[in-house]
Image (tube, grey):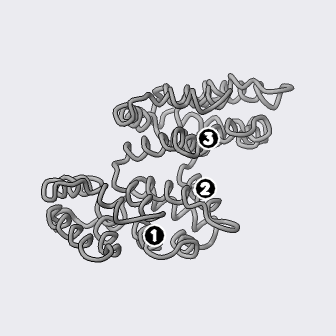
Amino acid sequence: MASLTVPSVLISPRDDAMQLYKAFKGLGCDKAAVINILAHRDATQRALIQQEYRTMYSEELNKRLAKELSGNLEKALLLWMCDLAGRDATLVRKALSGDVIDPRAATEVICSRTPSQIQYFKQLYHSMFGVYLEQDIEVQTYDDHKKLLLAYARTMRYEGPEVDRASVEHDAKALFKAGEKKLGTDEKAFIRIFSERSRAHLAAVSAAYHSMYGNSLKKAVKSETSGPFEFALLTILQCAENPAKYFAKELHKAMKGMGTDDTTLIRIIVTRTEIDMQYIKAEYHKKHKKSLNDAVHSETSGVYRAFLLSLLGTAH
């Protein structure tokens, strides 16, 4: 779901590369021109532009962008220039080995992706950074949170819509027994079910849990677990039920109150633009009675704002 992608027939990556080079020339960079080109090109087009730029000017476009831009615009645009899996690998690596360790960001990326997305970005992770994703998880996370992330990243889950009713009820009972029914919590049962079951199955377990025990599985997770482990379980559960609603909620959190969490804002908008942004915008509007575009407009400024709004596309 890229916003406003221009049909590739009308575009020559060579022309785009020349226009970008022109935007970098002279005093100061013509940031509006850079945004105007790159925000409206899909992943394939962006890769071709990078190739052309390298061929024509013997330098990496991304290196040049890093030189010409700064702050949030630089962060957002450089992330946008990666392909989907490259972005996920970059974000998780930075979250687990950067200057500031951010287990929450790593957890959000890992626990909101499909098994095939995880497998693909894990391969890239190793080829880009020379370490395995699991090694970084081992070093930077702890206890049940670590166990869940490792299990979730390693397991190939079914990705189709079919579920087995009997096994759904069996899991709902097992989770009730492991949590609300007993004193203390059997975390192993939560880790096993949440890391091994498909999204469709987990969503069905959640519905069955509610009808069998009159309480939501989400509430049970909240009352039985805490900290990063709780956040990981809730991310998996909410993305099984409705990923767009989950991301709309995280975006709202990033912008409410004093100040804006730009890191989260950039991460979600840039990584979801080409996946499900139209659905996220619809969920945001449904819940907050205002458009995501309006919220982003009031929380950001300048060329950074212009870039994010270009990715979001039209407000309706």
Residue nearer the viewer, 131 or 39: 131
Q: Earlier in the sequence, mark 1 or mark 3?
A: 3
Q: Is residue 32 above or below residue 218?
A: below
Left or right placement of residue 184 versus residue 210 in this view: right
**What is the crowding at mark 1: few (fewer than 14 residues within 10 Å), some, or many (at least 20)?**
many
Q: Is residue 268 above or below residue 148?
A: below
Q: Earlier in the sequence, mark 1 or mark 2?
A: 2
Residue nearer the viewer, 68 or 215: 68
Left or right placement of residue 276 versus residue 222 in this view: left
Q: Quadrant of the N terminus?
A: bottom left
Real-space Cα separation, disc 3 to disc 2, in angstroms? 14 Å
Query: For the residues carrying marks 3 and 2, which lies nearer the camera in this image?
Result: 2
Real-space Cα separation, disc 1 to disc 2, in angstroms? 20 Å
**What is the crowding at mark 2: few (fewer than 14 residues within 10 Å), some, or many (at least 20)?**
some
Residue 233: x %, y % from top left:
64, 37
Secondary structure at badge 1 equals: helix
State the residue position of label 1.
304
Res. 177 image quadrant: top right
Q: In percent of the image, x 54 and y 49: which residue is there?
A: 243
State the residue position of label 3.
237
Residue 82 in view here: yes
Q: In percent of the image, x 60 and y 37: which residue is there?
A: 204
Residue 196 in view here: no
Query: For the residues carrying marks 1 and 3, which lies nearer the camera in this image?
Result: 1
Q: Amino acid at mark 2?
A: Glu
Q: Amino acid at mark 3?
A: Leu
